[in-house]
Image (cartoon, rainbow, N blue to C red):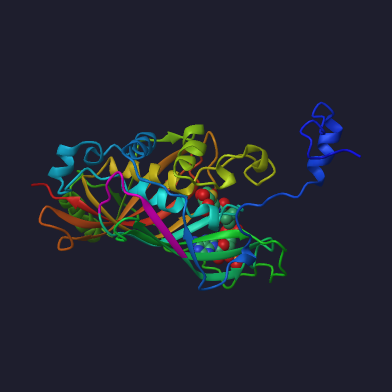
Amino acid sequence: MTDWTDPDALDLSDSEAFDSMVDRAATREKGHFFEFFADGDELAHDPGLRLTHHGSEQWMGQTLNHDPAYWRADTARERGFDERPVHPDYLLACVMGITVEDLSEKGGYFLGRDDVTFHQPVTAGTPLSVTSTVVDTRTSSSRPKYGIVTWETEGRDRETGETLVSYQRTNMIPRREPAATDGGAVGEQDEGGPALPETLVSPDGKYFEDFRRALDTAQEEHAAVAYRHERGRTMDDQLVAGLPLATLNTARQHHNRDEMADSPSGDIVAYGDVTRSIALAHARSDEATYREHRFADERFHDFVTLGDTIYGFTRVLDCDPDAGPERAGAVTFEHVAFNQDQTPVYSGRRTALIQRDT
Ligand SMILES: CC(C)(COP(=O)(O)OP(=O)(O)OC[C@H]1O[C@@H](n2cnc3c(N)ncnc32)[C@H](O)[C@@H]1OP(=O)(O)O)[C@@H](O)C(=O)NCCC(=O)NCCSC(=O)C[C@H](O)C(=O)O
C-alpha cells in the first residue's frame, strides 16, 4: 500500500495523476459568502497594517495626487498640520483594504460608500485597528447569485484607540446557494430627468472665492458650475494589482487573472479606491485644497479594467464661507470618474476645505 505521507509518493511528472488529485481535493476557502453575515454582527480585522510614508507616496505618485502638503514637512506646517500626514485616499484605502479578507474577498462588486468622515490628520507609523458592524443584509432582486451587504467600518489608531476614519460601504456578495428573486422588477421609471443647463460655468481660479463667484454667476444665469479636468490616467498593472495589494486588499478581482477570465469584465478590475483617487487627483489639481473633510453617496457604476483611461468631471454644489478656519471655506463638489468612452465609472459628493485667496 502507498504511504501518502512519503514526500516521494506523488509523481508530479505524471500530469494525469496530479490533475486527478487536485480535482478531488477540498479547497480551503478564504472569505465569506453572503449567508455568513447577519445584521448586528461585529468583526475585528487584524492583518496588522502600519501606515508608512513609502506607501502614501507610492499611492500619491501613481494616482497623480501631487499635493505638496503630503510630500514636504514645511508645506505641511504652512497648511496647519503639526507633522506631515499620510494622504487621506491612502488612509481610506488601507482601512478598507484590511477589511477585505473578512468582508468581500469572495468577490462580488463594491457598489458604493457613504458617510466617509476623516476625523483627524494621520501620520506615518500609525498602526491600524479596524472593526466593522453589519448594518444591513438583503437579497438582490435582480441577481439571484448575490446578496447585498452594508457594513459600518471604523479605522482607529491601534495604540491610542482614536478614530481616524469611518464610513458605511455596500457590496454585492456571492451567495453559497442562489436565491429565488422577484426578477428585479422596477417601479415607475423617471421620465428623462431634469433638463440639462444651457450654460456650464467654470471657475476662474483654484481658490474658495473663485468657486463662490462661479456659483453666484451660475445662479443668476440658471447655469451650472461644471467642468472637466484635462488629465487622464491609463490603468496599468501597478494601479490595478499593485496598489490594492500594497493596502493588503485580497480581493481576487484585482490580482487573479485566471479567476477573472470568466467574469463579465474578462480580466482583473481596478480597486474602486484607486479609480476614485485618480478622478479626485484630477479635480484637486484644479483647486487649492486645504483639507479633506467628508464624502457621501459614493457609487461605482461600471468596472474599470487594464488599459482603461480615467478622466474626471466636477460639478460645484455649494460653498460655505463659515465652515472652515479663517484661511479656508468649505466647498461641496460632485466628482465623476469616466473612461475613454465617456462612461461614468464612479461618482461621489465631496466636501473639502479650499484655501482662500489671501
Ligand atoms: C454591480 C453592477 C454590475 C450592477 O449593475 P446593474 O445591475 O445595472 O445595477 P443596479 O443599479 O441595478 O444595481 C444592482 C443592485 O445593487 C443595488 N445597488 C446598487 N448600488 C447600490 C448602492 N450604492 N447601495 C446599495 N445598493 C446598491 C441596486 O439597488 C440593485 O439591487 P437589486 O435590484 O435588489 O438587485 C454595476 O453597477 C457595476 O459594474 N459596478 C461597478 C462595480 C465595481 O467595479 N466596483 C469597484 C471595483 S470592485 C472592488 O473594488 C472590490 C473591493 O476590493 C472590495 O473588496 O469591495
Q: Name the outermost residue toward the left.
A: 358
The quarter of the rendering in which ligand 1 is drawn is bottom right
Res 278 quadrant in image: top left
Q: Name the outermost residue toward the top.
A: 13
Where residue 322 appears, x then y in whole percent? 15, 63
Where residue 337 appears, x then y in whole percent? 43, 46
Residue lying at 54% horizontally and 52% vertically, measured from the top left:
101
Q: Is residue 134 visible?
A: yes
The reply, left or right, for residue 189 in relation to residue 284 is right
Q: Quadrant of the N terminus?
A: top right
Asked if the magenta segment contains residue 126, the reply would be yes
Q: Name the outermost residue toward the right.
A: 1
Query: Relative to 149, is 290 above or below?
Result: above
Residue lying at 59% horizontally and 70% vertically, measured from the top left:
138
Where residue 293 appears, x then y in whole percent? 27, 57
Q: Is residue 301 visible?
A: no
The reply, left or right, for residue 67 in relation to residue 131 is left
The reply, left or right, for residue 112 in relation to residue 268 is left
Res 317 quadrant in image: bottom left
Magenta-tinted stretch: 121-132
132 or 1: nearer the viewer: 1
222 or 302: nearer the viewer: 302
Asked if the magenta segment contains residue 44, the reply would be no
Residue lying at 72% horizontally and 49% vertically, measured from the top left:
27
Query: Relative to 288, is 170 above or below?
Result: below
The reply, left or right, for residue 311 in relation to residue 181 is left
Where residue 144 appears, x then y in whole percent? 69, 63
160 or 260: nearer the viewer: 160
